[in-house]
Image: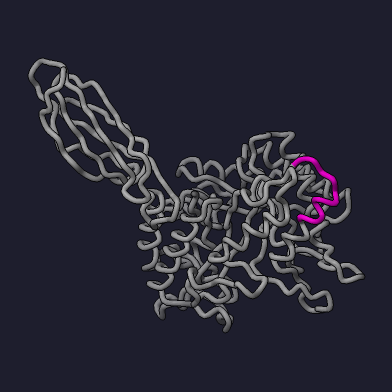
Amino acid sequence: MLVGATEDAVRSADPQVAQRQMDLLAAAGFRAVRVTQVWAPGDTTVSAADATILANVFAAAKKDGLEVLLTVMNYGSRTTPLTDSDQADFAAYAAAVVRLTGLRHLIVGNEPNLNRYWLPQFDANGDDAAAPAYESLLAKTYDAVKAVDPNVEVIGGALSPRGGDDPTATIRPTHSPTQFVLDMGAAYKASGRAKPIMDALSLHPYEDHSSIAPADGTHPNTTSISLADYPKLVALLGQAFDGTAQAGTSLPLYFDEFGVESQIPAAKQDLYTGSEVAVTEPVDEATQAAYYRQAIALAFCYPNVRGLFLFHAIDERAMTGWQSGVYYPDDTPKSSLAGVKAAIEDQLGGVIATCQGLRLTPTVTVTQRGRVLTLRCSLDCTYVAQLYRVPGRLLVSKRGRARAGLSTTLPLRVPVAKGSYRLRLSASAAANAGKPVLLRQALKPG
């Protein structure tokens, strides 16, 4: 599972600025970044200015070892791609982005269940107009992107976690993700399409307020979907798509926006403008770190989830925006950064949570340099290392633990005396342990 940041601060025409901002993400432990690229009506190719920005983003990400997810979206509801011509242009533009960047993960649109990004939401009869139109756009974009590179993962949805489902609303006509998924399924079935429209679905599972712990934010009696509503989301996808060419119950998921706002200390107040929105209910930085850890642990245990992205890494200066980062606007770290970084490391090591039904087996390598043997496990692992003199004399046996991805010196030494030696090493995941891996390796005298 990728744990990343949703952060457009890395988009810069200056490669040094892009790299500096990307370095902040890497320093916080993030392994991926999600950025946006705006399409406008009539665009079928990427402008020279945007091509420069994207080149800087991808170069900086490559240097820091971060995976890039990119959202191609219309700026707002005034530019909703509704006509066949606009949808064809949008699809061509998305394909051009893939061709230009070598992108591996493309998200189509942003929160089409909200009137802020997509209008109309309802037709004159009060029926859903947004989901069928978005399903059409998704299908066209899927085909255009796959024609360029069939290995690109096309991700649909990018849904807001809440919506009203009220066609009489005049100020904010919206759809809940629950109804939108079902209506997407109905539109897909009505289209008669015999191939998928997406390889994965994304959702923005924000809690109702930042003060709500992720594990507590279930909505069994409403149409909202937050992190803890994973079973409901999977069931909805099954209801919408199972039995068709489009995966439903088994569809991979990305939670590509999730944020917890933190309170601003007095010493940093001058970095911000405006006033906080009352309903946000920001928490202290220790609670922010704890909630982010809990969110990562929840997502880690969900079988279909492929990524969780924190929105943002760096606070927005305007208090009407999101102060959900692990950095202040001056790029200095909050006290929550250390806890978030540790949570990401524990997730990578497979030890952030014990998950029902999850069984992990690490891959291991051992290198020899003189008398010293160094172990690397792909997950946090426990091991038993035994040194034998061939044909079968056990010289030493040691137990230990290794951290994922780090070189760990085994607590034994290869003899210097002439002879044939062999290492027998058994390793198991430190948590959620599955079948142990067994390595046998011939050694040279030290």
Q: Could you tell me which residue is drawn at 39 percent across and 57 percent down?
A: 353
Vertical arrangement, residue 47 with respect to residue 163, above or below? above
Camera sees residue 445: no
Of all residues, the one furthest to the right in this rendering is: 124
Q: Position of residue 147 (x, y in %)?
A: 74, 34
The residues colored magenta run 185-195
Camera sees residue 425: yes
Of all residues, the one furthest to the left in this rendering is: 417
Q: Could you tell me which residue is drawn at 80 percent across and 45 percent down?
A: 140
Q: Position of residue 409 (x, y in %)?
A: 21, 38
Left or right relative to 308: residue 397: left
Identify the main secondary structure in magenta. helix
Q: Could you tell me which residue is drawn at 78 percent across and 48 percent down?
A: 90
Left or right relative to 152: residue 396: left
Q: Is residue 186 magenta?
A: yes
Q: Is residue 119 magenta?
A: no
Vertical arrangement, residue 94 with respect to residue 375, above or below? below
Q: Quadrant of the C terminus?
A: top left
